[in-house]
């Protein structure tokens, strides 16, 4: 079993080699990969490396030699049996994957259409299914084959990517913004990233130029932080090399920040029209307001209330503009402190124009004074509003706002004049 595992590892790992002016696919073992530079995207990455092999499989039509005078390069089209091609005309040994069966001879032919190969010995040829056998090369490489030239190559690959893991932790009147990057190595190659940059965009398909990529890395290594340079959201991974084992994920810490909760309010919103009859329940939610202390990554954040060392999961919130000094409102969960309803008491007409009289009844179930905001969207253009703690905030929207004392009930009556 150990022998079969070793053979499987050897024949299934493919790398790209530059040899005698052509780029070939050849089998390789799990040796430690040469360091690479990488702009790591959410779906794929832009790689730069100087080596006689490419560590990862490039996306077709993305190979970009970066040095002047690089010779013409050709390489085999992707194929599951490409590693057999280099052994055509050479002596090989094949062993069956499940039975005690082996053949030794010259590999003379590979037929991708039928998935078979031909091995010949003493003028006798045998046709065998390629997927049933392990390939064991028997001939050593010649000196001119082993002398390979290092080249500097850029290419895109979907074998390296990352996923943001973003959280907001709420405790003692503060919001802690916590960011991690989950790096994904989808290849069989152990990766060493010497220069790395996380690129936060969904449209990461066009190759990035070497000059701008390298300059961005060098400019931000001194003080790593989330940057918005050239309207691209990125984060440099620093000067320490990062190693990722094959087929694994690596959770990498990013900068944190902490902001004071500036406001906490119970909010409700609803749409009303002249034909409303009876009470309309008000569904309040808990809204927090704070200002970002640093630039951070946009995206979907998980929120948690921290209590006694435990994390209580709350809503997922989407933050689009996460810039230093920008203030945001987030909804964390359904309010358990305030309930209420809204009733249309009177309307001068069922059609527009109309003067509507509304009455809101609020109950505070908590032992603290609570702030509230009710945003009411109407079926007509608001001309005027009358009443305490009510104001027009847009052409068709009014807001009822204020505070309600602990364990109390509050009755609010106001009028809205509507026109066509």
Image (cartoon, rainbow, N blue to C red):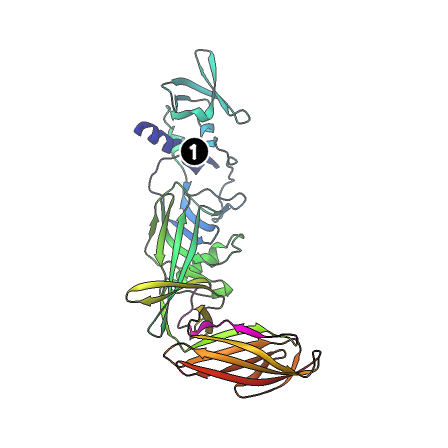
- Residue 324, position in %: x, y? 43, 72
Residues 300 and 111: in front is: 300
- What residue appears at the point 50 percent right and 55 percent down from the top-left corner? 209
Q: Quadrant of residue 143?
A: top left
Residue 13: image location, x then y, percent? 40, 36
Report whether residue 204 is seen. Answer: yes
Number of other residues with Cα within 10 Å of mark 1, as a class: few under 14, some 14 to 19, many 20 or more: some
Q: Extreme left residue here? A: 308
The residue at the point 47 percent across, 51 percent down is 46
Can residue 20 be seen here? The reply is no
State whether residue 126 is above or below residue 289.
above
Residue 280 is a magenta residue: yes
Q: Which residues are magenta?
A: 275-299
Q: Residue at x 34, y 52 (%)?
A: 242
The percent coordinates of residue 307 (x first, y second) are 31, 67
**In front of the other: 111 or 2:** 2
Q: Residue at x 50, y 71 (%)?
A: 283
- Residue 132 position, x and y percent, is 43, 24
The quadrant the C terminus occupies is bottom right
Q: Is residue 401 above or below residue 22?
A: below
Q: Is residue 300 above or below residue 160?
A: below
**Per the image, is 283 magenta?**
yes
Residue 407 occupies quadrant? bottom left
**Left of 238 or right of it: where is 107?**
right
Quarter placement of the N terminus: top left
How many marks on residues?
Answer: 1
Residues 21 and 361: in front is 361
SS at mark 1? strand
Which residue was labeled with disc 1? 26
């Amino acid at each position: 079993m150990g022998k079969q595992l070793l053979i499987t590892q050897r024949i299934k790992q493919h790398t790209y080699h530059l040899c005698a002016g052509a780029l070939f696919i050849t089998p390789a073992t799990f040796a430690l990969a040469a360091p690479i530079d990488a702009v790591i995207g959410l779906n794929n990455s832009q790689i730069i490396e100087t080596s006689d092999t490419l560590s990862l499989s490039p996306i077709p039509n993305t190979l970009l030699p970066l040095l002047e005078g690089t010779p013409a390069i050709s390489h085999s089209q992707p194929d599951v049996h490409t590693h057999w091609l280099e052994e055509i005309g050479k002596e090989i040994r094949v062993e069956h994957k499940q039975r005690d069966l082996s053949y030794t001879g010259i590999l003379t032919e590979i037929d991708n259409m039928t998935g078979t190969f031909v091995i010949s010995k003493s003028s006798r040829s045998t046709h065998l299914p390629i997927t049933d056998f392990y390939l064991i090369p028997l001939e050593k490489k010649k000196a001119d084959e082993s002398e390979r030239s290092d080249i500097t190559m850029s290419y895109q690959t979907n074998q390296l990517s990352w996923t943001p893991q973003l959280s907001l932790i709420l405790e003692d009147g503060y919001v802690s913004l916590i960011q991690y990057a989950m790096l994904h190595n989808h290849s069989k190659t152990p990766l060493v990233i010497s220069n790395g940059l996380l690129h936060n965009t969904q449209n990461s398909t066009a190759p990035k130029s070497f000059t701008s990529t390298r300059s961005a890395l060098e400019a931000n290594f001194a003080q790593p932080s989330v940057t918005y340079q050239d309207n691209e959201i990125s984060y440099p991974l620093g000067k320490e090399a990062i190693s990722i084992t094959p087929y694994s994920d690596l959770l990498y810490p990013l900068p944190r920040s902490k902001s004071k909760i500036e406001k906490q309010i119970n909010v409700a919103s609803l749409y009303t029209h002249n034909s409303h009859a009876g009470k309309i329940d008000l569904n309040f939610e808990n809204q927090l307001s704070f200002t970002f202390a640093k630039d951070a990554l946009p995206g979907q954040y998980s929120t948690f209330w921290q209590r006694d060392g435990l994390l209580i999961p709350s809503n997922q919130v989407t933050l689009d503009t996460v810039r230093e000094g920008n203030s945001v409102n987030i909804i964390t969960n359904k309010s358990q402190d305030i309930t209420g309803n809204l009733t249309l008491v009177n309307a001068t007409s069922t059609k527009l124009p109309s003067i509507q009289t509304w009455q809101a009844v609020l109950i505070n179930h908590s032992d603290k004074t609570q702030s509230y905001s009710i945003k009411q969207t109407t079926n007509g253009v608001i001309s005027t509003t009358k009443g305490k703690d009510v104001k027009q905030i847009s052409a068709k929207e009014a807001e009822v706002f204020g505070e309600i004392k602990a364990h109390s009930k509050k009755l609010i009556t106001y009028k809205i004049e509507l026109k066509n």
